[in-house]
Amino acid sequence: MLTEYVEKILKARVYDVAIETPLEPMPRLSARLDNQILQKREDLQQVFSFKLRGAYNRMSHLTAEERQKGVVAASAGNHAQGVALAAKKMGISALIVMPKTTPPIKVEAVRAYGAEIALHGNSYDDAYAYAQEAVAKQGRVFIHPYDDPEVIAGQGTIAMEIMRQHPEPVYAIFIPCGGGGILAGMAAYIKAFWPQIKIIAVEPADAASLKAALDAGERVTLDQVGLFADGTAVRQVGEEPFRIAQQTVDHVVTVDTDEICAAIMDIFNDTRSVAEPSGALAVAGAKKYLTKNGLKDKTVVVINSGANTNFDRLRYIAERSEIGERREVLFAATIDEQPGSFQRFCKTLADRGITEFNYRFADQQQAQVFVGVRMSGRDEERQMLFESLDKAGYQWVDFTDNEMAKLHVRYMVGGHAPQAENERLIRFEFPERPGALLRFLTHIGKRWNISLFHYRNHGAAYGRVLVGIQVTPEFDAEFQQFLDTLGYNYWHETDNPAYNLFLK
């Protein structure tokens, strides 16, 4: 049966719209992992993903009568753009049904290709049902995003290109999997010629429909899926892709959100391009698989399947990438509530880079601080940090793998503190360099008690700190003189309405 797909792939019509994307080395990641990582750049297609291959190949098989009636697709992303582009190229009508929740940037990208758009419902299932109505009422042909032999064959042309670009067999190919179209097409082609190459599917841990199906021996429907990697957020793997996967897939690797974000950063570091979460799945899976199995000096291929990410997601991705790379540890610690305690605590952290420091006065005896510390990525370094805190007598709780702490609590440390009397709120700015925060605290010294502290290192040239300091009225002049001699830019924020509403 695999030979049938080889023939389909060899005959597939994709290059009217698609380009043969490069197979590029990832030198920085390769050096880190001691393996050669080759990245197939499907993010360089004109719709910024591989999806136009399958869409165009399927539509090239339409009869004259079917072309006359047009096509319909249900999609909120890459498949929609692929179908719209193919329809424009062929001069046929296309109706793209998208959920009302689809970001405007994706709606406009589809509209730019001249497709008719219908916004319906709040989910893919709602859009799919509406698309089926268009099939029944208008006679349009439904172009499935993954469960169609011609779509699968179109995606399989990626494997054909890899074999041409790298004539020697590689150790493994890591392929993202949602519905399974790209996985099925590539796996069928590769295994037909090079059965010794490992085919490793990579899924989001919160949307692992293929793994669940393989474990059960049949397709299953997940109760729910995570939406971070929205391009692969599929509750049930396709019927035909699953049949092929049962014959061809050697392993399935699942990766979490932090690991995906770290992979996006790896791709950026090597290419200066930004992959979408689903586009970085293969890189995340390769990193996890190679490290877990202790593999060295292997050559592997990873598929960068797309770059259609919303700009407003980049801050979240950057925030989580350091944790995913194990380069940042988040924890809470209990310190004494007295002048100079911050400074002593920072000295305990030695020369480690502090990435975050959140605190709000709550008790006269003890203070709870939320801290981020930069790591090199070695687990033993994380252990050494906590051993140093134990030795210094601090109580601590590791939050690095605590989802609520990472998503919410880190931004909520604070609140009103009516017991923090005579509090003055000052915003400081200082040149950001190693040890800058400790020097800042050393300059503040032990003269006044700190009742609020917020610092986050975003990699900018200047560090920005919001500090609450308790100063009784008789020391106003002395405090002002102290601010003027600190040597840092500062702004008084005690009268800021945001302070009065949420912190005072």
Image (cartoon, rainbow, N blue to C red):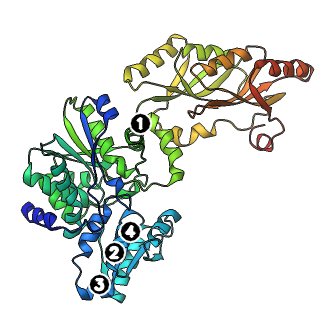
Q: Give the mark, 3 or 1, whose residue is nearer the N terminus.
A: 3
Residue 416, picture quadrant: top right
Look at discs 3 and 1 and give the one toward the viewer: 3
> In this orientation, does residue 457 appear?
yes
In the rendered structure, which disc, 1 or 4, sits on the residue that comes first in sequence? 4
What residue occupies the far right of the structure in this picture? Answer: 474
| Badge nearest the viewer, 3 or 4 | 3
Q: Which residue is mark 1?
A: 324
Q: Position of residue 410 (x, y in %)?
A: 58, 37
- Tell me if label 3 and label 1 are in contact, CB under 8 Å: no
Q: Quadrant of the C terminus?
A: top right
- Give the residue pinned by disc 3: 67
Residue 361 in sight here: no
- 1 or 4: mark nearer the eye: 4
Which residue type does callout 1 highlight? Gly
Which mark, residue 80? 4
Location of mark 2 (residue)? 89
Q: Nearer the viewer, residue 437 or 43?
A: 43
